[in-house]
Amino acid sequence: MILVFGSINMDLVAEVATIPRPGETVLSPSYAHLFGGKGANQAVAAARVAEPGLVAMVGCVGDDAFGRMCTANLAANGVDVSAVTPGEEPTGCAFITVDVTGQNAITVASGANLQPTAGAVPSEFVDTHTIGVFQMEVPFPTSLEVARRLKACGGRVIWNFAPVPPGFGRAELDMLLDVTDLFVVNEIEARSAAAILGVDDQGLEADARNIASSGKATCIATAGERGAIAFTPAGERYLAPALAIRPIDTTGAGDTFVGVLAASLGAGAEIAAALNEACIGGSLACQAKGAQAGMPDGAALRAAIG
Ligand code: RIB
């Protein structure tokens, strides 16, 4: 199974001509409530392409309307929500501006996402067949505890280092990489991780190679329209192209990449094929507004792979 331990948000999205700089105010004609949260997005992306019943989410929402809507949305997408619990804080909210090129800027108010506990993960979700998917929108020590439990049972760990927490240090990154099989970063996150490891900036490929060679995890770095690159700790290198598309909204593209990657590996794919499918999934996700609307189902993904 695929166990996603992470965040669940309601995204409040405004379209703008340009994303405001610090101190600037810009106007947008309206805004939309859309389902989001890196954890929830990754769970939905995985569930859309995986066999039914294989994806479960563990996280917290508020005891409020957004929380009920987000939980119902996960369930409607085929995600097991039996371990999605109401916390005492309000449901997490992400305040997102999207510009005319499809680029975005996001501020997340964590709320209930600060409240998941490792004890909330049912033991039947944790075994040698489980692929655990983690991000950085819930407290790191809690995620680490769940990841360690999963590794102790022989499961696999995919860790999306997003968003990079301020002040995240070498000791914490070493602990994270120590329990991680696949470490997924975008260009900014790759640079942050490499800098934490003390590596000078020599570009994305060098960052990914250096991160992988620093420990036991394969590093996968996504590069938007340039696709993705992966390095194993032994130095094996894999490349996958993105689809040539005109992006409408890139929100959730990275989450789709991670979810499809997990589903693909869970279905038995090797890293090269899984990387390719994840890149295509991430590209397709950019063709609709919002994090989840463009995520492909299995048929759409197969059609795009050709
Ligand atoms: O990765 C995109 C997601 O980041 C959004 O859905 C938002 O909720 C934030 O968590």
Image (cartoon, rainbow, N blue to C red):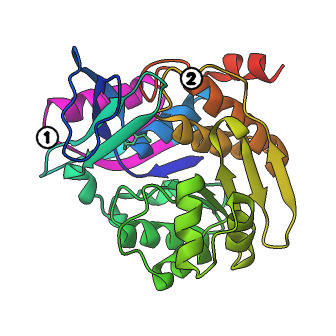
Q: For ligand 1, which image quadrant applies? A: top left
Q: Residue 263: x percent and y percent?
A: 65, 40
Q: Residue at x 72, y 23 (%)?
A: 244
Residue, disc 2? 247
Circle 2: element type: loop
Question: Mark 1 and mark 2: span between their CA atoms?
Answer: 35 Å
Q: Quadrant location of residue 241?
A: top right
The correct choice, above or below, for 60 with respect to 290 in the image is: below
Which range is magenta?
Answer: 56-81
The reply to whether the magenta stretch includes residue 16 is no
Residue, disc 1? 63
Q: Quadrant location of residue 46?
A: top right
- Specify whether 169 is left or right of 48: left
Q: Amino acid at mark 1?
A: Asp
- Specify whether 36 is left or right of 206: left
Is the residue marked by circle 1 packed among few (<14), some (14-19), or many (20+) residues within 10 Å? some
